[in-house]
Amino acid sequence: MNRTPDAPAWEELVTTALLGTDRRTPPDTTALLGTDHRTPPKTTDRRTPPETGPARDAPVALLDAAALETVRRRAGLLPARAAARLEPAPEDTRPALPPAAARRLALLLADRGGTGGGRRGTAPDLMELLPQWLTAANAHGYAAPPHMLPALLDAARGRTDLRPAALRFAGTRAVWLARLNPDWRFALRATPGGGAALPRPEERERVQRLWQEGLFAERVALLAAIRAREPVAARELLATTWATERAEDRLMFLDSLRTGLGPSDEPFLEQALADRSRNVRATAAELLSALPDSALAGRMAIRAGACVAVDRTGAVPTLTVEAPHECDPSMERDGVVSKAPAGRGERSWWLGQLVEAAPLGVWRARLGGRTPAEIVALPVADDWQAELHAAWCRAAVRQRDATWARALLGTPSAPEAGGPGAVSLAERAKLLGTLDPGERAEWVAGFIARHGLSEAFQLLGVCAVPWAGPLGRAVVDALNIARDAGSYPWSFSGVMGLAERCLDPAEASRLDGLLAVPDETEDASPGAGGYWAEAFQRLVTTLRLRAAMLEELSGTARAGDPPARA
């Protein structure tokens, strides 16, 4: 490796050139160019007098200085010590890919550019299949072919969603390569310790050294790894430096306590309620509210319970709401944000936070022993229903309470398209996340059967892949109905793209009857029939391609067969 003298002088010339000589005076070049460098050039043409003065001298002087400095830098290179030879890349002891799967990976990586915009035709988007291929390959525990690592890292560089699976598949050799190519530096940031194994909790000296001296990403990874195995040890490690950490770092470290959260964390989190950072206080309060027996949960239960009651004086029992009239210091200490967002009433803002943080178990005793479904079914006076139910939605998601989630979702065939508590598609999607995958798929399938696909896209995104049989059939049936109705086809392109990635490949045979171009009715969108046939052809081709990918990765593909092409 060589080094060059006078690097600051060169940087000064570059800076002046970038800014322009009219904004920055060039450095003094007299010593470099001689005392006569400002002499105007001679000319024999009397019609065009030579341009002189600062307007010409400054740019000319700058270029002359740059030329001379370039020669000096090239001639003045000094030899440096010979660099040590690179250590060989670490061995990857995982089994090699089956040959057919390796050929498939090469095809997927070669199609990195995707299909682009516009009409897609019947060809599958291979780049969209790469995430599924990587997930399946990692499930089998295969090692990445060494010669494909550069293309794999290039693909992960351009798509952050690929990085976790791609780096896991690439293994430690990705880190080895990333140290040699700045374009792949993300692999170093994403790999704690730059590829070095994290110390085990029992290696106390190594743990302490990394915790005290490591980079922030390394410390976060260390805390998360210890928390997953020994929650108490991780919390005690965090407590040793808590008072000296930056606010943004405290927030990230505190977030790691979500894993293995338990009653023993309460004293530490109670102390964090007095933190000088509002975000840290809010996170500590959120974690404490997820512990139904914590002191904070008890305090929130008392506050929220005082705001909601059953009025039995009328013909039908009704929930009445009396929102807080102030946000006192004790509420703020427990994580209630006093300042409401723009356009939001203060009292409703405070009420929502109290109900969200209160343990859901308190409402049965508070509201006459009613079940969650019975509570949600009660009318709410004075237009407080949306605010109250939305807060219960957030509480059900935070506390992972499936019983309350079912009550708030309601039946999928309800006219309200999701039940009285689901105030938005986003809330419904979060509530569905508390249910097991089978129940989740069944609910969304019922929703699609009743309300169609126009409202279901966000709900489909939370369903496990591949979609369960009832859900996949509901999606295909709804697409078929939309096609037969002459619906505008491009409005379903998002759902069709999801189906290509999420339908069970075994469903491909059920779609053969949808490949023909349907007769277009008078009220159908022009060209819709051809588009639908094209989209279904692409869907079938993609499903069969996914089935072939899984066979190749399982090693059941016939030896010598080339990979199926789009």
Image (spheres, helix red, strand yellow):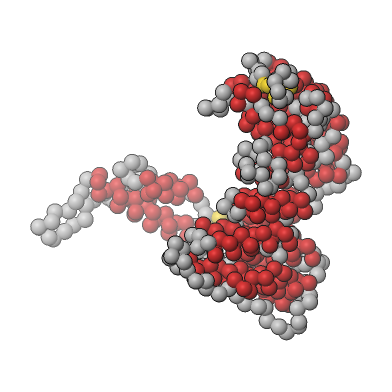
Give the residue furthest to the front.
315
Residue drawn at (67%, 15%) of the image: 328
Which residue is at the front of the view, 145 or 516?
Answer: 516
Q: Compared with residue 500, is residue 207 higher up or lower down, i.e. above or below?
A: above
Relative placement, left or right, of 527 versus 379 is left
Is residue 233 visible from the viewing direction of this image?
yes
- Give the side of residue 34 with respect to residue 484, left or right: left
Where residue 159 appears, as percent x and y from the top left, is 60, 57
> Which residue appears farthest toward the left when viewing the image?
47
Residue 528 location (% of width, % of height): 48, 66
Residue 253 x %, y %? 73, 36
The image shows residue 513, relative to residue 157, as above or below, that is below
Quadrant for the N terminus, please: bottom right
Camera sees residue 88: no
**Picture mark count:** 0
Q: Which residue is found at the position 80% from the left and 33% from the top?
A: 371
- Locate the C terminus and report the quarter of the image it occupies: bottom right
Q: Nearer the viewer, residue 232 or 308?
A: 308
Q: Residue at x 56, y 57 (%)?
A: 494
Q: Position of residue 537 (x, y in %)?
A: 58, 72
Task: Indicate left or right for 245 with 54 as reference.
Answer: right
Corner quadrant of residue 558: bottom right
Residue at far right of view: 202
Q: Judge from the rendering whether residue 289 lies leftward or rightward of residue 420; answer left or right.
A: right
Residue lying at 55% horizontally and 55% vertically, measured from the top left: 3
